Amino acid sequence: MKILILIGNVPDTTTKVKFNADRTAFDASGVQWIINPWDELALTRAMELKETSGGAVEAVVVANVGRAETEATLRKALAIGADKAIRIDADPKEAGYVASQLATIAAGYDLIMAGIEAADYNGNAVGGMLAEMLGMNSVSAVSGIQIENGQLKINREIDGGSQVVGLPMPLVAIVQKGIAKEPRIPAMRGIMMARSKPLEVVQPIDAAPMTNMVTFEMPPAKAACKMIAEDQAKDLIHLLRDEAKVL
Amino acid sequence: MSVLIYTENWDGKFKKVSFELASYAATVAKAMQLPVIALSLGPVDDSELSKLSAYGVSHIMKNSDERFNTLDNQAIAKAIALAAEKVKATLIVLAHNNLGKAVAPRLAVRQKAGMVSAVHGLPFSYDPFTVKKMVFTGKAFSHAVIHSGVKVITLASNSFGLVENKVDFAPEAFETGLGDADFVTRIEQTNKITGKVLLNDADIVVSGGRGMKSGDNWGQLEELANLLGAGTACSRPVSDEGWRPHSEHVGQTGKIIAPNLYFAFGISGAIQHLGGVSSSKIIVAVNKDPDAPIFEAADYGIAGDVFKVLPQFIEAVKEVKSNG
Ligand SMILES: Cc1cc2nc3c(=O)[nH]c(=O)nc-3n(C[C@H](O)[C@H](O)[C@H](O)COP(=O)(O)OP(=O)(O)OC[C@H]3O[C@@H](n4cnc5c(N)ncnc54)[C@H](O)[C@@H]3O)c2cc1C
Ligand SMILES: Nc1ncnc2c1ncn2[C@@H]1O[C@H](COP(=O)(O)O)[C@@H](O)[C@H]1O
């Protein structure tokens, strides 16, 4: 079984979001880039499966659509334990464009894992789009994956509960909270080994983006918080009813 | 040409999100001078379907195939695509919930459509088709343009609201022609959360953080939630500690919610937490540290002890309720 993990390269989650002066683009100055948190958990789970499946998982490959500066992120994925990285050398313009690029290298895997959303533009799209492009099955909101007798057993969240489901491979699993507990931190040995692991650079294909973001805005500034004294807490409930009108 | 909405059902019933979708699509379709059509998949009674017509949707395509209850992503995407072709949908709207997020991208590829998720409210313009979309997990919004002829969007819940507009109702049977091979998801087990207000449906959410000190201290918080008909939520460390179930975790790596009213008890207001709740209409914070960042996001606050404030809140809500 071969596993492919789609890796988004995103600003660190504590980044204070800023835009350029005319608000047409994200201002990346001083930003720390990380593996998209869901993708990091997906990779962690893939490594666990590789280690515990008694040889059922032959290889874990990671792939990213991005320019040369994302290679640090891919090297980290290799340090965590991936066997090989693929970078498609293009700006990740939008979900459809990214999925079209990934479709050129994603055939032949039994399991592809994508995150439910990238922490920057929250597209919620690449995994599902890639599945449809490749004619693969997909399952979303995945919070657990086990291999049992060579079959995948999947936990997924549904609105109002959770389910255990089975789906045949090849499969795209779109993962979220729960897929692994904590992201794996690369050990010194992993970092050393990552240097000699293959990082293949692939040229992009032509694909027309169908959406683009023209401007950005910050959420409206909140009025100052109205403070109520601790021993007057009841007044706050009255304000919620009479002033805010939410009770 | 038309505007198509996919109205998911839960055991044959619709929820507020379904009616918000109907209200939204009816309003958008009017502006685009197009008819609005709802698609319902899986067994739903006509009396339930008719509820959509209270929000401006008269034309409903229904297919009662039970196999759709498996929430099979590929079969549902195929069925919506077939319906979209039939009614020549140029705009397809789904809810921004688990199933909507799962199906919309597949549908977009099938229809050669550009897709934008987590759309907030009405489009800014219809030509070019420009919508407001949440980005950076609620820290900002973008104005996103969809260039393709067919467009797919998912609507962020509570970003538009309900618009009542009763119209005549005419359901129409819709055949999909899907075979067993189209349904590949085998359900082995389902665990439903029962007897609780679900977080994504809740108008009011009562949430606790590490300041609650222990999972054993949730009694008053739950009492307040019960009195208010509210859902309960928590910060990430609380679910990591096992004080509360993971399904209650809100924030960047948990659920993203937008209730009318959000109570944060003993939550510091870390940026990753705020990402999941900052679209709430009104935020109330109780924290003993007056400099806690949660107060920058809050509308009302008390710099005080949760255990002193909770009993007063409970009493006040009881009074407010008994006075009608
Ligand atoms: C990649 C990443 C993703 C993350 N995702 C999320 C997420 O999705 N959701 C999330 O919540 N967090 C998330 N976090 C964690 C986040 O950074 C914070 O650590 C977390 O939100 C803090 O939780 P808290 O406010 O409950 O606890 P604390 O930060 O410990 O705050 C407790 C607060 O309670 C107050 N307090 C203590 N006792 C009392 C009392 N008796 N009365 C009143 N107030 C009291 C204190 O003053 C303090 O402000 C994430 C972190 C990372 C790195
Ligand atoms: N540029 C990219 N390269 C590789 N994978 C990506 C890229 N962008 C997004 N993904 C994958 O798609 C998931 C969802 O991203 P999105 O649809 O952009 O919200 C991410 O969690 C990644 O797994």
Image (cartoon, coloured by chain):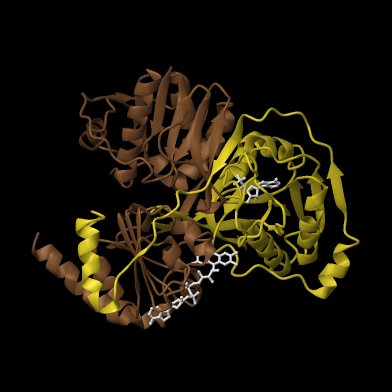
Residue B17, given in percent of the width and then of the height, sits at: 34, 44
Name the residue located 69 percent from the left edge and 27 percent from the top edge: A208
Q: In the figure, the yellow chain has which letter?
A: A
Of the 4 image quadrants, the one containing the C terminus of chain A is bottom left
Please tell me whether residue A24 is drawn above or below residue A196 in the rendered image: above
Instruction: Give the camera-side residue of B113 and A104.
Output: B113
Residue B96, given in percent of the width and then of the height, sits at: 45, 44
Q: In the figure, the brown chain has which letter?
A: B
Can see residue B38? no
Can see residue B197? yes
Residue B223, given in percent of the width and then of the height, sits at: 24, 72
Residue A42, given in percent of the width and then of the height, sits at: 65, 59
Of the 4 image quadrants, the one containing the N terminus of chain A is bottom right
Counting the numbered discs, the total is: 0
Q: Quadrant of residue B56?
A: top left
Residue furthest left in the image: B323
Please tell me whether residue A237 is drawn above or below residue A202 in the rendered image: below
Name the residue located 56 percent from the left edge and 41 percent from the top edge: A216
Q: Quadrant of residue B323?
A: bottom left
User: In the visual, does B186 lie left or right of B260?
Assistant: right
User: In the visual, does B79 lie left or right of A184?
Assistant: left
Instruction: Give the camera-side residue of A30 and A150.
Output: A30
Please tell me whether residue A158 is drawn above or below residue B106 in the rendered image: below
User: In the visual, does A39 lie left or right of A190?
Assistant: left
